Amino acid sequence: MEALILIIIIAVIFFWNVEANKRDRTAIGFKRGHKVVSMDDSIEYSGKTLYSKTLPLCGKPDRISRDENGNLIPFEEKPNATRLYESHIFQAYVYCHLIEDNFGVTVPYAIARLKNGREKRIPWNQGAKAKLASVIKRAFVVLNGAEEDSKTTAFGKCKGCGFNGVEC
């Protein structure tokens, strides 16, 4: 499972580096006329990729909504998942970080919507932030060749992987 999480983090870092060369940091895609997620029009989310200013991360949440207390909450749709996997949790952590970094607000949790509409709340707190930072640090150790990660034994996942044909 740790290998899967590292692969996801490595993919996020890879795509962040590719996209970082294409974008102007001052234009992160917030435009009028797109989906407004606040009642007072102070924050808008255009559905474009969000980039972190502090960590090598980027991502695009499926949806950002406000909860009953006015907090911005990232939603991630997992329509085929019957349970919450660790990779889903780390994906939610990334989205929480990106929202805090881009909008300057505190995100208390994320929500993953599973098969049959079941919703799971994923807390975003100091412990979650520390876990995300630790996984990112480990991913850089592996990427820099200082340590080799254990290879996956879930070969069925290899068939559907976007990196099929590249040795893991």
Image: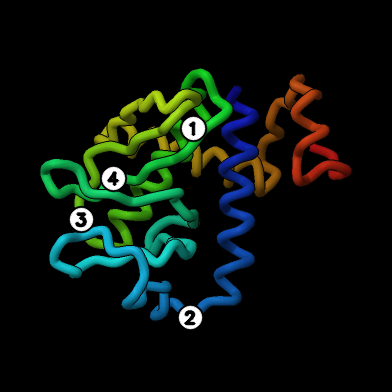
The extreme front residue here reads: 116
Q: Which of pointers 3 and 4 lies earlier in the amino acid sequence? A: 4
Q: Distance of mark 2 from mark 4, alpha carbons?
A: 26 Å
Per the rendering, the mark at residue 73 is 4
Q: Which of pointers 1 and 2 lies earlier in the amino acid sequence? A: 2
Secondary structure of residue under mark 1: helix
What quarter of the picture does the C terminus occupy?
top right
Q: Report the amino acid beneath label 4.
A: Ile
Q: Report the amino acid beneath label 2.
A: Asp
Q: Distance of mark 3 from mark 4, alpha carbons?
A: 11 Å
Query: Which residue was labeled with disc 1?
Result: 88
Residue 150 x %, y %: 71, 26
Q: Report the amino acid beneath label 1.
A: His
Per the rendering, the mark at residue 24 is 2
Residue 121 x %, y %: 31, 28
Image-based side of 166 in relation to 145, left or right: right
Q: Distance of mark 1 from mark 2, alpha carbons?
A: 29 Å
Q: Residue at x 47, y 65 (%)?
A: 48
Q: How many labels does the image show?
A: 4
Label 3 CA crowd tier, 10 Å (few <14, some 14–19, many 20+): few
Q: Nearer the viewer, mark 1 or mark 2?
A: 1
Look at the image and tell me whether residue 133 can be seen. no
Q: Residue at x 48, y 80 (%)?
A: 24
Q: Which residue is drawn at 34% across and 75% down?
A: 33
Q: Which of pointers 3 and 2 lies earlier in the amino acid sequence? A: 2
Q: Report the amino acid beneath label 3.
A: Val
Q: Is 82 or 122 nearer to us in this picture?
A: 82
Q: Nearer the viewer, mark 4 or mark 1?
A: 4
Query: Which residue was labeled with disc 3?
Result: 105
